[in-house]
Image (spheres, helix red, strand yellow):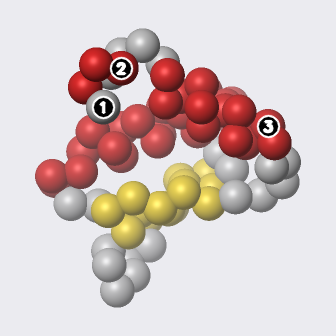
Amino acid sequence: MKPFRGRHVAENAASQVFDKHPGSWEVQTNATDRNKRAQAFWRKTMNNYVSDSCVQEFVATRDDNEKLHG
């Protein structure tokens, strides 16, 4: 939602979800040019949360999703 952009609201919410569900998880985003904002958000959020233990992997799927593993 535009009013909350740049205020770290979504990143904080994602971190709370990750804290409540520890373990290995995967985030998938649509790898199209129209989805660059979401891709950048998840890259930044995952890297900030897990530091160096995040692996980014580009996997061609039926939907051409990009996967980030934490």
Name the residue tied to disc 1: 1
In front: 40, or 58?
40
Name the residue tied to disc 3: 19
Looking at the rendered image, the disc whose residue lies closer to the viewer, 1 or 3, is 1
Label placed on residue 46:
none
Label placed on residue 4:
2
Q: Would you call the spot at circle 2 few (<14 residues within 10 Å), some (14-19), or many (20 or more)?
A: few
Q: Quadrant of residue 48?
A: top right
Q: Amino acid at mark 1?
A: Met
Q: For marks 2 and 3, give the CA distance.
A: 22 Å
Helix, strand or loop for disc 1: loop
Q: Amino acid at mark 3?
A: Asp
* 66 lies left or right of 13: left
Q: For marks 2 and 1, give the CA distance.
A: 6 Å
Residue at coordinates 47% horizontally, 40% vertically from top-left? 43
Looking at the rendered image, the disc whose residue lies closer to the viewer, 2 or 3, is 2
* 2 lies left or right of 61: left
Mark 2 or 3, nearer chain start: 2
* Residue 27 drawn at (x, y percent): 54, 57
Query: Is mark 2 in CB contact (under 8 Å) with mark 1?
Result: yes
Residue at coordinates 69% horizontally, 50% vertically from top-left? 70
Q: Amino acid at mark 2?
A: Phe
Helix, strand or loop for disc 3: helix
Asked if residue 66 is positioned above or below residue 52 in the image, the reply reads below
* Residue 6 drawn at (x, y percent): 36, 16
